[in-house]
Amino acid sequence: MASRLILTIFFLTSLAGLSVAAVPNRQHNNTATKMRYKCLSPYRRIGNRCYYLSEDKLPWRDSQFACNDLNNGYLAKLDKNWKDRKLRNFLNRSKEQNERWIGSSFDDRSNKWIWAKGGEALRYRGFSQKRPNDNYRWRCAIMNPIIFFRWSTRSCLTTKKYICEIPIEIIGGVNESIKRKHLKGGRNRRIGHRKKYQPSLSNQLN
């Protein structure tokens, strides 16, 4: 009888030790999920990026410089489907009715659509349809409210409202190892590092 009582006490003590050991792990996991974000004024958070929707109208190239003056921003680089979709959904919900420049233009020297930020050719395209016979010389991309903010092309010399972009910032409650892991995360956590914008020579109009 005494030996059975001793075994029972030992068993209960072991269980208590296991439950206490599990608490720090739960606390660590909770800390890892407490992500907070910040967009510098006048940008606003849309998805995991920061965007500014202008009130003024400028030609496409001047819009690049205006974005650069706003915290080293750049015309929106919607190089992923999920980024384009997030911004389109926001604009459609807000009942926005303005055509707005984004950061892509046609480079007649390479005969390709390229991004002003980085200068690389487009891989993802949000155009409403493909029209290979069109002459795209001096054409730039807009988000078009008539077709639910799919992309269209306009002369780069016309004045339009525009959309600037900067990376979102992670602030507070996250140690550096977790922050680095988050910055390298998957589809819904693609948060880029800020680089100073320099206009691509291939995008400058003569």
Image: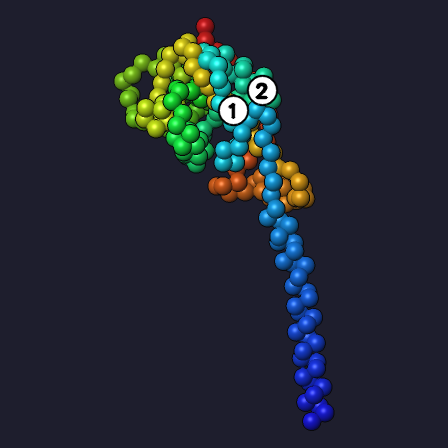
Element on which disc 2 rests: loop
Return the residue at label 2.
70
Amino acid at the residue labelled 1: Tyr
Q: Position of residue 145 (x, y in %)?
A: 36, 24
Q: Position of residue 165 (x, y in %)?
A: 52, 25
Identify the residue shown where x is 65% and y is 58%.
Answer: 25
Left/right of residue 33 with respect to residue 133 in the rendered view: right
Element on which disc 1 rests: strand
Amino acid at the residue labelled 2: Leu
Left/right of residue 129 with respect to residue 71 in the rendered view: left
Return the residue at label 1.
52
Q: Position of residue 181 (x, y in %)?
A: 60, 44
Considering every residue shown, the one lying at the far front of the view is 95
Kindly indicate whether the residue at mark 2 contacts the one at mark 1 (C-beta within 8 angstroms). Answer: yes
| Residue 202 at least partly seen | no
Identify the residue shown where x is 51% and y is 16%.
Answer: 64
